[in-house]
């Protein structure tokens, strides 16, 4: 993971820009937006991020890959749904967009740090 754009968008070197599926973080011109970006940076920068990329629409209207991101739990080594973690932390809300294959109702529990 190379750069966090905002709470729900980031760049992956060699892959491109990724928009987290079915979550909506506040805009960057708000204090909550800055906090969401900081949260994402704390969890994602320098980490290996595993992506489940949407295979229905593939990219959104802005040319971003739509995906559920998974990061490794430092205690157990298991993969944790970062989309769910962002929501459970209060830095985003669920928006179940119907134009992708994902269903936020299927997301498991989130890791807390």
Image (cartoon, grey):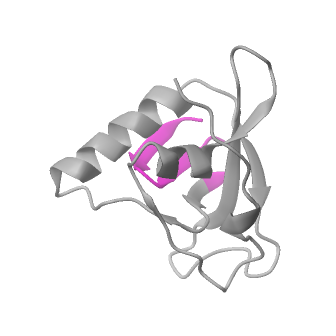
Where is residue 43 drawn, in percent x and y?
52, 30
Q: Is residue 19 left or right of residue 106?
A: left
Q: Is residue 75 depicted above or below 78 in this figure? A: above
Q: Is residue 4 magenta?
A: yes
Q: Residue at x 68, y 60 (%)?
A: 67
Q: Is residue 13 left or right of residue 36?
A: right
Q: Is residue 105 depicted above or below 18 in this figure? A: below
Q: Residue at x 65, y 66 (%)?
A: 66
Q: Quadrant of the N terminus?
A: top right
Q: Residue at x 58, y 67 (%)?
A: 64
Residue toward you, 61 or 102: 102
Q: Is residue 89 magenta?
A: no
Residue toward you, 52 or 3: 52
Where is residue 5 drawn, in percent x and y?
40, 49
The quadrant holding residue 99 is bottom right
Q: Is residue 58 depicted above or below 23 in this figure? A: below
The quadrant holding residue 73 is top right
Residue bounds of the magenta highlight: 1-16
Residue toward you, 4 or 110: 110
Q: What is the number of callouts on the image?
A: 0
Where is residue 76 drawn, in percent x and y?
78, 18
């Amino acid at each position: 993971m190379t750069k966090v754009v905002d709470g729900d968008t980031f760049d992956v070197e060699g892959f491109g820009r990724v928009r987290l599926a079915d979550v909506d973080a506040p805009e960057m011109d708000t204090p909550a937006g800055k906090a969401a970006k900081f949260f994402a940076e704390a969890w994602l920068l320098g980490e290996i991020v595993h992506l489940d990329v949407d295979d229905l629409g593939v990219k959104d209207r802005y040319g971003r890959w739509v995906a559920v991101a998974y990061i490794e739990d430092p205690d157990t080594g298991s993969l944790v749904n970062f989309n769910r973690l962002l929501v459970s932390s209060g830095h985003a809300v669920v928006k179940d967009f119907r134009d992708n294959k994902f269903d936020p109702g299927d997301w498991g529990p989130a890791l807390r740090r």
